[in-house]
């Protein structure tokens, strides 16, 4: 019995001993460890380039008190890796090793309580990057170790933040040591050590996340813990962190980060006097602290101590003075980095030096806007007080600066001061830009601070209320549009004061203000969907609203992603809707959503499909001015997609829609990015278009435009209402708005024939006669999107996207007028005007994606670099005589080759360090091991070509070159489609001419016709093409004998040489003659000594080549709607036949068509398109010797409208 009790006591003692295995340090002992940490970036595939860094050192820990310890680091070495996997190794970096060692040599103090690291202290001059490296070392002493249970989950603070942790413990029976496995789920941290910039305007899309991930991270720790009297001592520890990133779906291949670290106990000694640590400062706990990284641009490493910003700005201005120098556009990133390191006084000194030169001044103002903190606001504040910038300069700089500011509360307050400056209020365009950009800043601030204080948006609320109170429509309108940019839920109450049926008091505002109020809820719809849904439904049901306001309510409602119940409610009201224009818009909008394939509309498309079944019978065939059109697509493998919509909103009172809105969106990496949006609203313009206007017929012919242009009609318009308004939005943020008022009448008078000398138009003409020289350049950092987060090493891993453009325009021009004695603009109608001009228009776009470690000391990672320069040189002479309706252009013959457009891209393993900043290492991710004889394999794919089309007549040619190199299953993994070298270019080259060419002469001559060619006439002509071939032939045979068509437009393109031998082409468009209102003709003929052919379209009467074209809608037996087209020829140039025979089959197979050999009709090509379903078609193309076909070709839009329209035509026929 005693033995049993003794045994039981031993078990209890042993269990209690293991139960208290918290990681402990004895303050009376000194611990020495060997530490090594390294990180690598690459693709994870063999024979690929990779980069990385390695830190090795010794660690000594001694105690100051039971809970406070001193950490000392010695023998520090830093090495970097850049090369091919298996063929390259880490190489020492002595300069950087010394720099890091000097920082780590200083003592660090930390608290260690219950197995967790608390406060860390260090000397004031120790950088945050060094502290983070120390955090990576100390994280091995930061864990929760339990003996029971052996598997457990905890949410605890670590170097990555507050994250879920999974532990598993096991006792080694041979050594009595405990093996602990810890897995940290850093993808689901409640509070994550991460920072994101530049993506506030890209909306997170949860539905896309359900289809795949673009980034996955895992961290695992392995500990060997030896039991001691105090608890548990770390004998060895190992950590492995892996991160997979792709711009697409990671399951289709990814860039990979592998970070690992290891610590091994060398010895434990008793006693030892702690080092004299001196004065230390508290530097935080174990959580990685992200350094303010605005100056640490991941693509640039340079010596920031050297004052070279002024010199570089001057150099950039000179480089791009005449045309864009594509080799130096990347230097703008270096300037941005340098500017972000300067103090306020430095910026003021730069302004004094650079403002005197227009080129330097413009570059500086464009680039200083990218400082993105309070320094740029202080700089602009000084400029606006001193008024030493123009309103135009202020608008451009303020828009960029405010939209690129960091989202911090103190910057929002500083921006409020800018808004209230007298200089801002003195110019309406500048004031509008300030309001819009402040709204954008508030939106970005609220994206990172939730709940967002209402004080942030209060100035815009005050402006809206003031405008309503004083009946100031301009203030109301601008405030509402700025509130739309802000998207603040706290603005809903103010916005509803402008909406009928929702406001507490009756609303007495114009329709344009109501529409602006409804649009102001477009971004709030995501932040407070239920409130916006309620408001939108109330506005939709209001019958005293303008129809376009009701339609806008539908658009805003669907921005909230309504539930099935709300869609059903809307459907029920639509079934009783009597306004046919509102019903037409609503039905088409629902139809578009029903067939949408983007993830954000997945559930909504189902609800709308059900609604369509209820509404189709009543509204399915409506086709009015008020309609919505949408096209979209999405690829699950790429996790990418796009959508485009076009909405026309209006009512029965106008020929034109009241509002037209065009929107584009881009879906990628789990976010929805709104691209460009354009909107135009016809205000009092509607009074100038309609049957009430004398002379207006409604066919939009020349006479209709003359009726609209009648100045008497313009004079009757109200003075306080705009004629038309337009806006532009980028990333959902409105940045441009313009009202065209009645004062436009003065500008119209200035360009009327009776306008005398002294008008601005005359001044421009006189300046052009003297000679005009104009140059403009603009660097713009379009995108700077960055995601930084901690790694187990304490080094920040970053995913960054940069996109910048440098644009330049240079124009030199001089005009001459003969005769020169003109007194009115009308005198110029019969004058010969000549213009000599020379210049260049171009831009270069640079795009980067970076995945790697980025600190002020070193960088390593994977970097994709792309460049796309475009350059269009211009040198031409022009002659114009308006009275004779003649335009002549002369261009010199092509003597030198130039590149019109090109694109180059490659993926690299990169390494940079501050020890040698001018010598970065860059290795192509895929080694350049290709040769022209190498055969393609699944792991080796190469396409290279040089194709030229040259004209011996004009002595000029166009060449297309491309060189594409890929490896590793390019077809299976989408990521690898961008992993490799790419170069493509379009070049204009001289060609060997049959005769010497001095210049190319282009002549356009318009002749008056008794029957003007109207828009409606052209439409009717196209309708006629759809009739059957028999009807076309019989009608033409009757008319050919009676009527002689009149030439309307003649275009000649002629190569001219010194002896005036001419050769080229002539294209003449003939207008129908009297009694033949449904026919037009075009003849193309060869000019010159060897001219031997002409081709006529729409009437087969030319010799020796004859072609006829027919297209018609037909009803197939199914019944399925069919569109048929046929091209017949009696004789055509042999080259045309050979070209079609050679290229059509290959192109068809490339696009997934099948081919069969068949004997079809000779000298004929026919095509048949059949509606297979609402979103696909069957295509069959028959050529003389074979047939190509493909079934169920997907459409990005619905074919329903095509089928319905052609059914109606067949019924009418």
Image (spheres, helix red, strand yellow):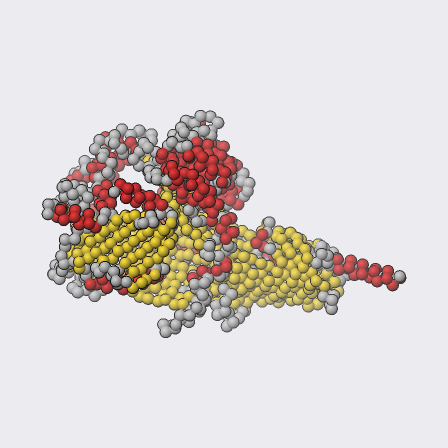
- Viewer-proximal residue, 375 or 158? 158
Picture coordinates of residue 110 (x, y %)? 67, 56
Say whether residue 1076 is visible.
yes
Q: Residue at x 33, y 58 (%)?
A: 1189
Q: Is residue 384 above or below residue 13?
A: above
Q: Is residue 763 left or right of residue 1074?
A: right
Q: Is residue 1169 left or right of residue 65?
A: left
Q: Residue at x 55, y 55 (%)?
A: 789
Classify the position of the N terminus by image quarter: bottom right
Classify the position of the C terminus by image quarter: top left
Q: Please, which residue is most extreme toward the right here?
A: 2
Picture coordinates of residue 246 (x, y %)? 48, 58
Q: Residue at x 29, y 31 (%)?
A: 687
Picture coordinates of residue 1073 (x, y %)? 14, 43
- Viewer-proximal residue, 520 or 1020? 1020
Picture coordinates of residue 1120 (x, y %)? 33, 48
Q: Is residue 337 above or below residue 947?
A: above
Say whether residue 302 is visible.
no
């Amino acid at each position: 019995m005693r033995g049993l009790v003794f045994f039981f006591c031993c078990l209890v003692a042993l269990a209690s001993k293991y139960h208290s295995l918290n990681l402990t340090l004895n303050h009376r002992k000194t611990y020495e460890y060997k530490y090594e940490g390294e990180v690598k970036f690459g693709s994870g595939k063999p024979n690929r380039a990779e980069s990385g860094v390695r830190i090795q050192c010794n660690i000594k820990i001694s105690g100051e008190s039971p809970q406070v310890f001193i950490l000392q680091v010695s023998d520090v070495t830093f090495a970097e890796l850049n090369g091919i996997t298996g063929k390259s190794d880490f190489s020492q970096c002595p300069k950087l090793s010394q720099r890091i060692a000097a920082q780590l040599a200083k003592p660090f103090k930390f608290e260690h309580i219950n197995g967790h690291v608390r406060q860390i202290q260090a000397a004031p001059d120790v950088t945050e990057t060094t502290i983070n490296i120390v955090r990576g070392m100390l994280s091995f002493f930061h864990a929760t170790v339990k003996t029971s249970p052996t598997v457990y989950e905890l949410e605890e603070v670590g170097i990555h933040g507050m994250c879920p942790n999974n532990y598993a413990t096991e006792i080694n029976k041979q050594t009595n040591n405990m093996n602990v496995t810890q897995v940290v789920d850093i993808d689901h941290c409640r509070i994550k050590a991460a920072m994101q910039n530049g993506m506030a305007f890209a909306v997170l899309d949860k539905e896309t996340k359900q289809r795949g991930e673009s980034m996955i991270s895992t961290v695992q720790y392995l500990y060997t813990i030896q039991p001691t009297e105090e608890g548990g001592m770390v004998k060895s520890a190992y950590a492995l962190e892996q991160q997979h990133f792709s711009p697409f779906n990671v399951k289709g291949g990814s860039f990979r980060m592998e970070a690992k670290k290891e610590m091994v106990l060398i010895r434990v000694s008793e006693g030892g006097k702690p080092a004299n640590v001196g004065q230390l400062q508290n530097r935080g706990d174990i959580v990685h602290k992200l350094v303010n990284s605005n100056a640490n641009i991941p693509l640039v490493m340079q010596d920031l101590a050297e004052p070279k910003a002024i010199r570089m700005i001057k150099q950039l201005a000179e480089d791009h003075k005449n045309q864009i120098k594509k080799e130096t556009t990347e230097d703008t990133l270096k300037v941005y980095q340098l500017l972000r390191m300067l103090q306020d006084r430095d910026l003021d000194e730069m302004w004094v030096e650079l403002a005197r030169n227009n080129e330097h001044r413009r570059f500086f103002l464009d680039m200083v806007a990218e400082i993105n903190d309070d320094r740029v606001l202080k700089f602009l504040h000084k400029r606006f007080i001193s008024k030493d910038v123009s309103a135009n300069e202020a608008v451009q700089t303020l828009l960029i600066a405010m939209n690129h500011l960091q989202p911090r509360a103190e910057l929002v307050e500083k921006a409020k001061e800018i808004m209230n400056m007298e200089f801002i209020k003195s110019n309406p365009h500048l004031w509008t830009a300030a309001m819009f950009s402040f709204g954008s800043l508030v939106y970005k601030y609220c994206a990172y601070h939730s709940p967002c204080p209402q004080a942030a948006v209060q100035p815009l609320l005050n402006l809206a209320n003031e405008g309503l109170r004083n009946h100031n429509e301009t203030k109301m309108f601008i405030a509402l549009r700025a509130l739309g940019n802000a998207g603040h839920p706290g603005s809903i109450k103010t916005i509803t004061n402008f909406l009928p049926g929702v406001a507490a008091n009756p609303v007495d505002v114009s329709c344009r203000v109501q529409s602006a109020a409804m649009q102001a809820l477009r971004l709030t719809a995501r932040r407070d969907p239920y409130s916006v849904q309620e408001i939108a439904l109330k506005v939709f049901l209001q019958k005293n609203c303008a129809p376009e306001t009701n339609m806008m309510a539908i658009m805003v409602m669907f921005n909230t992603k309504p539930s099935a119940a709300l869609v059903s409610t809307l459907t029920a009201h639509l079934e009783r809707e009597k306004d046919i224009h509102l019903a037409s818009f609503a039905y088409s909008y629902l139809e578009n959503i029903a067939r949408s394939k983007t993830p954000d509309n997945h559930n909504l498309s189902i609800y709308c499909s059900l609604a369509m079944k209820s509404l189709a019978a009543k509204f399915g065939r409506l086709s009015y001015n008020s309609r919505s059109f949408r096209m979209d697509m999405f690829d699950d493998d790429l996790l990418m997609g796009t959508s485009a919509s076009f909405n026309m909103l209006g009512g029965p009172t106008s020929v034109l829609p009241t509002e037209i809105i065009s929107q584009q969106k881009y879906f990628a990496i789990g976010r929805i990015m709104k691209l460009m949006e354009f909107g135009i609203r016809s205000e009092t313009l509607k009074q100038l278009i309609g049957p009430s206007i004398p002379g207006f017929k409604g066919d939009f012919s020349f006479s209709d435009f003359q009726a609209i242009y009648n100045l008497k009609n313009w004079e009757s318009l109200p003075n306080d209402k705009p004629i038309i308004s337009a806006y532009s939005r980028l990333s959902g943020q409105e940045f441009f708005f313009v009202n065209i008022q009645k004062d436009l009448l003065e500008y119209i008078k200035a360009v009327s024939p009776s306008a005398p000398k002294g008008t601005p138009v005359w001044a421009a003409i006189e300046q052009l006669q003297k000679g005009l020289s104009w140059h403009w350049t603009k660097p713009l950092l379009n995108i700077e999107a960055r995601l930084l987060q901690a790694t187990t090493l304490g080094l920040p891993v970053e995913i960054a996207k940069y996109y910048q453009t440098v644009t330049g325009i240079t124009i030199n021009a001089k005009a001459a007028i003969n005769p020169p004695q003109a007194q009115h603009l009308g005198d110029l109608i019969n004058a010969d005007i000549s213009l000599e001009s020379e210049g260049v228009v171009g831009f270069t776009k640079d795009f980067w994606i970076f995945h790697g470690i980025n600190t002020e000391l070193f960088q390593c990672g994977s970097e994709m670099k792309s460049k796309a320069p475009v350059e269009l040189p211009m040198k031409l002479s022009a002659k114009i005589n308006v009275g004779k309706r003649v335009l002549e252009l002369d261009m010199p013959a092509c003597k030198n080759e130039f590149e019109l457009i090109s694109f180059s891209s490659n993926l690299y393993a990169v390494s940079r360090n501050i020890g040698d900043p001018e010598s970065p290492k860059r290795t192509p991710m895929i080694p350049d091991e290709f040769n022209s004889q190498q055969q393609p394999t699944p792991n080796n794919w190469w396409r290279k070509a040089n194709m030229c089309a040259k004209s011996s007549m004009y002595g000029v040619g166009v060449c297309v070159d491309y060189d594409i190199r890929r490896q590793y299953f390019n077809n299976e993994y989408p990521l690898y489609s961008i992993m490799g070298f790419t170069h493509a270019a379009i070049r204009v080259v001289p060609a060997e001419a049959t005769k010497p060419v001095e210049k190319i002469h282009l002549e356009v001559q318009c002749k008056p016709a008794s029957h003007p060619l109207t828009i409606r006439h052209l439409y009717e002509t196209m309708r006629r093409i759809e009739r059957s071939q028999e009807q076309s032939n019989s009608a033409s045979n009757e008319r050919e004998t009676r009527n002689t068509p009149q030439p309307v437009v003649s275009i000649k393109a002629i190569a001219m040489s010194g002896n005036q031998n001419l050769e080229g082409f002539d294209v003449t468009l003939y207008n129908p003659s009297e009694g033949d209102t449904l026919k037009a003709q075009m003849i193309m003929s060869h000019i010159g000594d060897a001219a031997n052919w002409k081709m006529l379209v729409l009437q087969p009467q030319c010799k020796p080549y004859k072609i006829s074209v027919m297209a018609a809608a037909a009803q197939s037996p199914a019944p399925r709607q069919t569109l048929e087209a046929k091209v017949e020829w009696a004789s055509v140039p042999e080259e045309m036949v050979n070209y079609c025979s050679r290229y059509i089959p290959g192109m068809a197979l490339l696009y997934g068509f099948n081919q069969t050999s068949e004997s079809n009709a000779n000298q004929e090509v026919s095509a048949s398109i059949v509606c297979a379903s609402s979103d696909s078609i069957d295509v069959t193309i028959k050529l003389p010797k074979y047939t190509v076909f493909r079934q169920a070709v997907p459409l990005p839009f619905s074919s329903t409208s095509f089928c319905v329209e052609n059914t109606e035509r067949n019924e009418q026929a």
